[in-house]
Every structure is written in C-alpha cells, then in structure tokens.
C-alpha cells in the first residue's frame, strides 16, 4: 500500500512541478503574462511601488512570477523525491503531510479566487491525488 500511496503523491507533486516549470517558462519567454494593453506595460516599466524606488512594477511583476514558479517547483521536487525515495519517512510524518496538504489547499484557494481555469484544474487534480495518497496510507494503518 505504501507503494500506491507513494505513486499517488508523486503524481500530485509532478503536476505541481510541471505547472511551476510552465509558469517559469512563460514568465521569461513570450507575451502570455504581459498585459493586453501595451501602454500599461510601458507604465509598469516606469513606475515604482510605494515600498521602494529601487525597482519598477514591471520588475516586481516578473520577480513575483518567477518566485511563485520557484515555490511550485520546490514543492514538486521535494514532495516527489520524498514520496519516491523516502516514502516511509514522509508517510510517518504528520508535519510533512499537513504542510503539503496546506500548501496545496492554499494553491487551490488562490487559483480559484485569483487565477484562471488551467491552474485551478491542475492544482485541484494534484490535491485530489494527494488526498487519495493520504486515504490509502490511513487505510493501511
């Protein structure tokens, strides 16, 4: 049963990893995360946020998207690795399991409220696989 749970959780992590990698690519390549209004992008490149004049809104936008991608990539790599290489450690740690579930729940909320359907569906699927892994492991105990 731990093998099934490990594969379910690894599949969950892989979805988040792939979403994070895709987000990182579109952050730096192509216009997918650019505003539809070119004048807005031009303004974002000139205006700084209130917190500091050391950056622009455009640089902050790119940085926030890159760091957001990095978080998803980190989640996918760490939880995928733990699920496949150290499943017994992962499934014996309520802390790690709850942190992972909380991260996914947070992503589901953000995707539903602030993002769009593709990440929402992907993260929801990842969360369902994660919960399925938890169910499988709890049935085994």
Image (tube, rainbow, N blue to C red):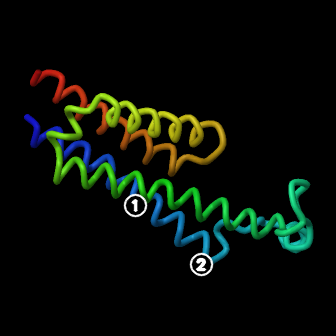
Residue appearing at x 22%, y 43% in the figure = 8
Secondary structure type for disc 2: loop
In the image, 56 versus 122, the foreground residue is 56
Q: Residue at x 17, y 29 (%)?
A: 136
Decide if residue 40 is on the left or right side of residue 126.
right
Q: Which mark is residue 117?
A: none
Spatial separation of the CA atoms under disc 2 and disc 1: 16 Å
Residue tagged 1: 18
Q: Nearer the viewer, residue 36 or 134?
A: 134
> Which x, y percent locates residue 133?
23, 35
Residue 32, placed above or below residue 127: below
In the figure, is residue 40 to the left or right of 29? Answer: right
Residue drawn at the location 75% of the way across and 64% of the way down: 60
Q: Position of residue 120 (x, y in %)?
A: 51, 44
**Marked residue nearer the N-terminal end (2 or 1):** 1
- The quarter of the image holding the N terminus is top left
Which residue matches tag 2? Answer: 29
| Residue 15 in picture, x, y percent from top left | 36, 53
The quadrant of the image that shows the C terminus is top left
Q: Position of residue 6 (x, y in %)?
A: 18, 44
């Amino acid at each position: 049963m731990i093998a099934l749970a490990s594969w379910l959780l690894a599949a969950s992590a892989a979805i988040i990893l792939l979403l994070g990698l895709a987000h990182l690519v579109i952050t730096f390549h192509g216009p997918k995360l650019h505003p539809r209004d070119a004048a807005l992008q031009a303004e974002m490149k000139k205006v700084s946020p209130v917190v500091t004049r050391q950056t622009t809104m455009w640089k902050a936008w790119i940085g926030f998207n890159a760091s957001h991608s990095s978080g998803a990539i980190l989640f996918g790599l760490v939880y995928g690795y733990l699920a496949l290489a150290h499943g017994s450690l992962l499934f014996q740690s309520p802390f790690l399991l709850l942190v992972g579930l909380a991260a996914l729940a947070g992503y589901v909320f953000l995707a539903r409220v602030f993002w769009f359907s593709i990440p929402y569906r992907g993260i929801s699927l990842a969360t369902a696989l994660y919960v399925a892994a938890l169910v499988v492991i709890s049935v085994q105990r």
